[in-house]
Amino acid sequence: MFYQAAAYNDSMMERIKTLLSLMIIIICLPYLVTFVVQGDFLNNSEQDEISENNSDEDTEQLLLLLVNEMPVNYEKEALKAQAVIARTNLAYAREKDQAEPKRMTREEMLEFFGGKNYQKYYELLKSCVEETAGEVVTYENKTVQLPYHVVSAGMTRESPNAGKKDTMPYIKAVTSMYDLSCERFLKIEFYTKKQFRNKLRSAYPELSFPEDEVEKMAAVEKRDSSSYVLTVKLPGQNISGEDFKKVFSLNSTCFSIKEVDGQVRIVTKGYGQGYGMSQYGANEMAKEGSSYQEILEYYYPGIKINPVS
């Protein structure tokens, strides 16, 4: 009897424990479900917030690039074309682990615009970035690097590596006749022969420059198909057009050197290196009704505008 009673008591205790466990589960189940569901909801919300913050950060970075690259009083379609260029060059730099394009800081932008115009221009640039959101330029399904310049010499330049392995086949020589009306298109400077010679001597002290013969001091030796100077001949040495440009602080390498009335005249056309999009030309195209896609496709033949991956 004693063993039967003990067994009976043990059985009752097990039943009581089981019943209590079931009651606890039933009571706690709603809380557990709520916790799990809310946990997922919070995680999703956090992800959305992170995504939104990243999007805002990208917009801000591109906006600060854009204000550093093109005048804000340009037509909106021209600014949108530049926004796509900025996004493309940023994506390219990150893919290749290169230095990113230079951007303004928020403080510099505020100082640049001034308090009166800040909000107006900020909203304009933000809309240009947002209306082209996620768009980058590709060529043969690859993100590319997009050079651009202020104003061409009437025609943009073909890639210097045309036909070679590391070429940019989308950098072609295209006419940009709008540029001829730009106030920065033409610059004419005069130097005395002594001033001209002294500048050259200062840059190349190892060379012997004649006193009076301008053509023997410096003469254009070779140009590309768009008339930009590739080589300048000095006494006993050839230098690049780019090097000569730096010596005389010229606006571009599309220049000519000539003696006029006993002085040295240097005529420079265009502003910038001449490759890719002319910003002035893009603005004039926008005035005529061209979209930012049409502008980009004109100055970079063969490219496609795709969402960034």
Image (tube, rainbow, N blue to C red):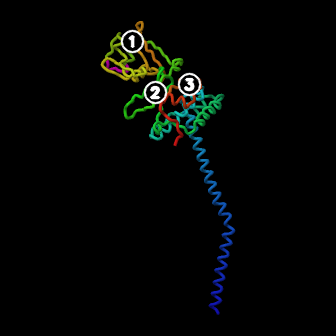
Instruction: Relative to 97, say whether 244 is above or below.
Output: above
Instruction: Let me know if residue 74 appears in the view.
Output: no
Dominant SS type (magenta): loop
**Total number of numbered labels?**
3
- Residue 110 locus on image (x, y percent): 61, 31
Q: Residue lying furthest left in this view?
A: 236
**Quick check: is 143 in the magenta stretch?**
no
Q: Which residue is mark 3?
A: 285
Q: Amino acid at mark 3?
A: Met
Q: Which is more toward the observer, 196 or 52?
A: 52
Query: Which dot marks residue 115?
Result: none
Disc 3 packing (10 Å; few <14; some 14–19; many ≥20):
many
Q: Quadrant of residue 243?
A: top left
Q: Mark 3 or mark 2: which is in front?
A: 3
Looking at the rendering, the stretch of residues picked out in magenta corresponds to: 202-207
Q: Which is more toward the observer, 196 or 9?
A: 9
Q: Which is more toward the observer, 228 or 242?
A: 228
Query: Which dot marks residue 194?
Result: 1
Alpha carbon of mark 3 to alpha carbon of mark 1: how far? Answer: 44 Å
Instruction: Let me know if residue 224 appears in the view.
Output: yes
Q: Name the N-terminal-most of marks 3 and 1.
A: 1
- Residue 99 locus on image (x, y percent): 46, 37
